[in-house]
Amino acid sequence: MADWSPVDLLPALWVGALGASLAWALRRWYDPVPARVLGVFAVALLILLGPVLCGGGILLPLDTLRGQVPFQRVEPTEPQGNLLQGDLIQLVTPSLAAVRGAWSEGRWPLWNRQAGAGMPLLADPQAQALQPLVLLGYPFPLARAAGVVAALRVLLALIFGFLWIRRQGLGEAPALAGALAFGFGGFLLLWLGWPLANSAALLPLVLYAVARCDDAAGRRDALLLALGTLALLLGGHPETIAYALGMAALFLLDLLRRRPRGLRWALARRAGLAMAIAGMVAAPLLLPAIEYLPKTMRAVRMAAGDRGAAAGVPVGNRAAQTYLPLAAPNAFGDSRVAAYWGLVNSNEDASGFVGTAALLAALLAARARRRFAQERLALGIAAVCLLLIAPLPGGPSLASHRLLLPLSLCLAYLAACTLERFQRGEIRRWPLLIAAAGLGAIIVWGYLAHPDPTDPERLAILRFGWLRWQLRFLGLATLLLAGTASWRRRSGRSLAVAGVAAAILAELLLLHRPANPPMPRQMPLPVNGPIAFLQWKLGQNPHRGPGYRMAALDRDFPPNLATLYGLTDARIYNPMAPQAYVARLAPILAGWQGEAPELGAPGHPLYSRLGVRYLLASPDARLPPPLERVFADADGSVWEHPGARPRLYVDAGPRIGRIAIPRSEDTWLTAEVGLNRPRRLASVVYQDGGWRVLVNGEARPPEREPGVFLSAELPAGESRVDVLYRPAGFLWGCVIAALGLAAGAALLMSVPRPSPHPNFGRTI
């Protein structure tokens, strides 16, 4: 840390200030979080993300770029990046950069011109254009903001997880254990940098707000529910948002069922109006997304039945690969070190792990005699989730592993319920010992009976090491809970439960802290010879000129990275990529790496039609004519295609007409055209239905050519052509949002009632 400076403390100070403000607001208007609990959360968060918040580290997997042109000479880092987190630098961060660029220029983030032929940006959930947690990271540069947003996600899950469990009638120590099991569990920490972590962080907030609406029945509680639901709707991952809203709806229905008949309508009206207003305010993002999502590559693949099933794997083996990681997360290796023989990868399969001690306590909740508030509902939700992820004989499971989000929260709550019973002295040693023995047997079987089928000794140190660690934590939790029977005082039993909470935290930090390794500050996005050349040629006037693109062959220069360098790439790596454009790439596709296209056939004329002026290739590449090498060094070579099309063009020779493009912004293009006879305006801009064409201020019907790109008929003579973009549903979404804000102000804000006049009712 020789280059450390006090500036590196700013992320920690910012997160601390936001956390302190939240704690003050909760104490002032809602339920307080004890200072000792906040201290535990702060210490645990510093252990998890201290190098990022205080030491200048960067929570982006920049190290994963090594080995690909033009990054083959980048030096490795210590610790090395997580191989599973390539999406964070190749998919998530470029979308965030596009949104930041739009906001910084005072524009709505409507369109991403730097991906392929362009694609909707506001309608792309992964861009998280209006997500509050992401917006709170804007005071910092993009690379440093990743750590700030990650810390806020964990902190939010911890605080509101604790408050929600306390609202269910549980004590401080059990609630702390449950909050730690969920906040540092696999789902949040393994997916910490992805948009679906927003759903995990915000779900406890929504549940707490629902519980507050049931108990306190104040406007402030409805306001909290509206804000929490709004933040959840803007989370960026539709599937987990649906699961989180479904879980909140089930808890609300259960509250309504348990209330007296005469009081149900008040709760339903209060909570329903709050959530409906949140949906109305989110309409400017939701309506364009609903319109666009059916046109995406992911939607088409899912409609075709492509769910990533493990073909050829027996159902029994798939069942073990599905359920075993919930108890033994490293039984099938670890994808972070590129050795995993489980169902999908260690993030997908092991994200439901909440700690050995928490799992033991959750198992004991199945046979409890006395239930706490909504404990039976949590048991039912957990059982349904386990059933839905079960593999089917003829194909994949009924639902994806994203159901591990509600499952993990239910397991954490069930564990807290069991610990509360132990704290109250309602314990039996024999059920505890039997459950511990059974769980220990599952863990031992998981690690010993599932070596790598291709190399049994591979990762043996990891597997056997984690077998020992989990048995230690299991034994420690069993001893603490079994010993509470001999303690007469409740304070002693509370201390034992606090010890279990400490064991849960220690195990989860030991397991999940390496999943998010910090990169050193000395490793920003590298700019070498080929990239500098492309920036010089293509990035000088971003809002003027023809708007040419670049591309790379095979797996070189992964798609979307161009956005981080101010360049435009003809490729798109995004499940939300428009399927029509993806299908248009078929003649030059060499293959797929997951959902990332790999291009080939460098001499194909389609490159010219897509506006690709430069191709990036390996240093020793030899490409066919008409491509001409214009730059080469040890990092890569750049080849120019002289016939590339601009963003807007007219197929007209010098005797027929001319076209100039003085404006080429993301959502507004202007062309000055002079034609001797009517011609067609063509483009390399993807038409999703939101582009509009004005000729001399008059609207012209836009068309698609050939089924993908924007085009329109132009008259003869001098014309000014304006091409404007507005997403389908955006205008109506703004109207609905305005109505929602007005309704919220009218229904949720407290208005003082005027006192009656002193002479009111008197008889003169």
Image: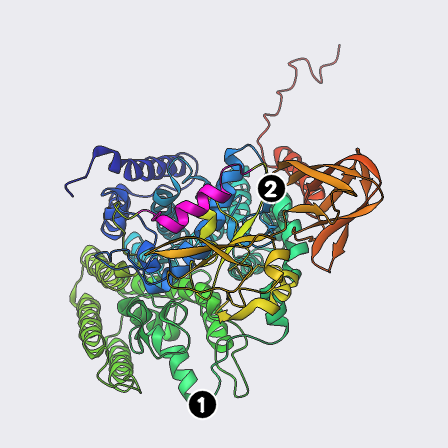
Q: Tags 2 and 1 in contact by the CB under 8 Å rule?
A: no
- Camera-side residue of 638 and 251: 638
- Residue 686 visible here: yes
89 versus 746 height, above or below: below
Judging by the rendered image, the residue that carries numbered circle 1 is: 314
Hey, what amino acid is under mark 2? Asp
Q: Is residue 282 magenta?
A: no
Q: Amino acid at mark 1?
A: Pro
**Marks 2 and 1, Cα distance to the nearest angstrom?**
50 Å
Which of the 4 image quadrants contains residue 695?
A: top right
- Image point (48%, 58%), residue name: 559
Q: Which residues are magenta?
A: 524-542
Give x and y (percent) for residue 224.
Answer: 50, 42
Does residue 537 belong to the magenta stretch?
yes
Residue shown at 36% from the left, 64% from the top: 84
Q: Rate crowding at label 1 as few (under 14), some (14 to 19) or many (20 or more) other CA atoms within 10 Å.
A: few
Question: Which of the two residues, 96 or 647, is positioned nearer the viewer here?
Answer: 647
Closer-to-camera residue (560/628): 628
Q: Which residue is mark 2?
A: 666
Q: Is residue 207 left or right of residue 82?
A: right
164 relative position to 583: left or right = left
Nearest to the eye among marks 2 and 1: give it.
Answer: 2
Which secondary structure, mark 2?
A: loop
> Could you say where residue 348 lies in the image, as x and y percent from the top left?
41, 69
- Earlier along the polypeptide chain: callout 2 or callout 1? 1
- Along the line of sight, which residue is nearer the eye, 529 or 572? 529
- Position above or below: 307 against 185: below
Q: Position of residue 451 (x, y in %)?
A: 27, 84
Can residue 131 be spotted in the picture?
no
